[in-house]
């Protein structure tokens, strides 16, 4: 009788070991899945943020360039500043127009001594 009980316990041992291995494997897979989903979600969030920042940067650049073109097209001097650095922008076609206007406004000088 005692041998039968011992044999029965020994026969159950592989089943218990097998179920422990399955349980441990299941826990490892769950932890791995949670970590993977978290990592993929984090990477997607970072990519989303970077895309939105890039779009905002491009939008800002487009706005500033559009404003500069609009103001310089009106032949206005546009001051720009970046920290300590300062500059004034002017459309070069406006400078050429001013030179032509100056030439037309000043009378042409003629040499009267050569007669």
Image: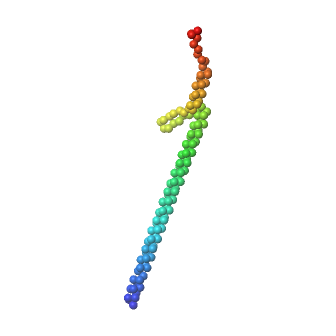
**Front-most of 99 and 3?**
99
In the picture as drawn, the residue positioned furthest to the top comes out as: 115
Q: Quadrant of the N terminus?
A: bottom left
27 in relation to 95, above or below? below
Picture mark count = 0
In the picture as drawn, the residue positioned furthest to the bottom comes out as: 1
Q: Position of residue 76 (x, y in %)?
A: 59, 32
| 94 left or right of 19 in image | right
Q: Position of residue 16 (x, y in %)?
A: 43, 78
In the picture as drawn, the residue positioned furthest to the front comes out as: 115
Q: Residue at x 52, y 57 (%)?
A: 44
47 in relation to 81, above or below? below
Residue 56 appearing in the image: yes
Residue 77 appearing in the image: no
Question: Image quadrant of residue 3?
Answer: bottom left
Question: Image quadrant of residue 100?
Answer: top right
What colouring style does the render use?
rainbow
Q: Residue at x 43, y 75 (%)?
A: 20
Q: Residue at x 59, y 30 (%)?
A: 94
Q: Position of residue 50 (x, y in %)?
A: 51, 51
**Front-most of 113 and 91?**
113
Q: Quadrant of the C terminus?
A: top right
Q: Position of residue 55 (x, y in %)?
A: 55, 48
Q: Residue at x 48, y 38 (%)?
A: 83
């Amino acid at each position: 009788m005692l041998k039968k009980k011992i044999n029965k316990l020994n026969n159950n041992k592989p089943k218990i070991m097998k179920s422990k291995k399955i349980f441990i494997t299941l826990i490892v897979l769950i932890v791995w899945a949670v970590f993977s989903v978290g990592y993929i979600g984090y990477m997607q969030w970072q990519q989303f943020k970077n895309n939105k920042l890039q779009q905002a940067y491009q939008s800002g650049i487009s706005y500033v360039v559009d404003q500069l073109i609009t103001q310089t097209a009106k032949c206005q001097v546009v001051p720009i500043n970046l920290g300590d650095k300062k500059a004034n922008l002017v459309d070069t076609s406006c400078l050429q127009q001013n030179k032509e206007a100056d030439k037309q406004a000043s009378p042409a000088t003629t040499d009267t001594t050569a007669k």
